[in-house]
């Protein structure tokens, strides 16, 4: 959950979106988020427009923990290109199969989405009708759709 929140865009940090990403129940994720907040790894953000709407952001303490414990990425950096490519392909196939079996849709990075557009000012999400900063274009979005 912490890793997801660190990579998710501002539109994709609600408890239900964390649950969807993790393929977990809302109750399980709710308890997980409460624990992360109690440990001051994330903080709750209420919407200015709708005070009932909650999202979460990673605190400096949470970001530091993620940087220290990124074991998988550290281990993967030692793989050769062929092994790395085979592993990525295998994991993508496996996840695609799980999503299909559970009738779920995948998440993806904004700049690989059919709704992402480059313009003279930078990037723009045509679905949400929102400009995107360069860093937001590289974040995970719950609205992601693969290009046709």
Image (cartoon, rainbow, N blue to C red):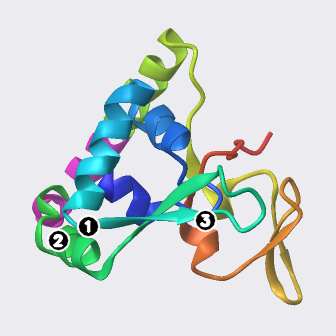
* Quarter that holds the C terminus: top right
The Cα–Cα distance between marks 1 and 3, rounded to whole angstroms, is 17 Å
Q: Residues within 10 Å of mark 1 (few under 14, many from 20)?
A: many
Q: Are marks 1 and 2 in contact (CB under 8 Å)?
A: yes
Residue drawn at the location 61% of the way across and 73% of the way down: 136
Q: Quadrant of residue 112?
A: bottom right
User: Which disc, if any, is residue 65?
Assistant: 2
Q: Which residues are magenta?
A: 73-88
Tag 2–tag 3 contact (CB < 8 Å):
no
**Where 147 falls versus 68 (above or below)?**
above
Nearest the viewer among 76 and 53 is: 53
In the image, 60 versus 137, the foreground residue is 60
Left or right: residue 16 versus residue 5 is: right
Front residue of 55 and 82: 55
Outermost residue, front side:
51
Which mark lies nearer to you, 1 or 3?
Answer: 1
Q: Residue at x 56, y 35 (%)?
A: 106
Q: Where is residue 65? Give x, y as percent.
A: 17, 71
Q: Which mark is residue 41?
A: 1
Task: Assess disc 2: are there few (<14), some (14-19) or many (≥20) residues with their C-alpha within 10 Å of its C-alpha.
Answer: some
User: Where is residue 81 drawn, in percent x and y?
Assistant: 26, 59
User: Residue 141's spot in the image, x, y percent?
Assistant: 61, 53
Q: Earlier in the sequence, mark 1 or mark 2?
A: 1
Q: Does residue 81 sit above or below 119 in this rendering?
A: above
Picture residue at 79% right of the left edge, 51% below the top: 114
Q: Which mark is residue 10?
A: 3
Q: Label 1: state its secondary structure.
A: loop
Real-space Cα separation, disc 2 to disc 3, in angstroms: 20 Å
Residue 111 visible, this angle: yes
Residue at horizontal 64%, vertical 51%? 53
């Amino acid at each position: 959950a912490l890793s997801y929140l660190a990579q998710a865009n501002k539109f994709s940090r609600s408890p239900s979106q964390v649950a969807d990403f993790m393929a977990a129940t809302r109750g399980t994720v709710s308890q997980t988020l409460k624990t992360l907040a109690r440990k001051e790894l994330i903080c709750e953000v209420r919407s200015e427009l709708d005070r009932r709407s909650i999202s979460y952001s990673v605190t400096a303490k949470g970001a530091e923990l993620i940087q220290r414990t990124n074991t998988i990425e550290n281990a993967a950096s030692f793989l050769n290109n062929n092994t790395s490519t085979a592993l990525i392909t295998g994991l993508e196939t496996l996840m695609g199969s799980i999503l299909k079996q559970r009738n779920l849709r995948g998440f993806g990075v904004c700049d690989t989405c059919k709704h992402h557009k480059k313009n003279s000012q930078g990037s723009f999400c045509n679905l949400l009708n929102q400009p995107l900063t360069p860093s937001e274009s590289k974040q995970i979005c719950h609205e992601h759709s693969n290009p046709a």
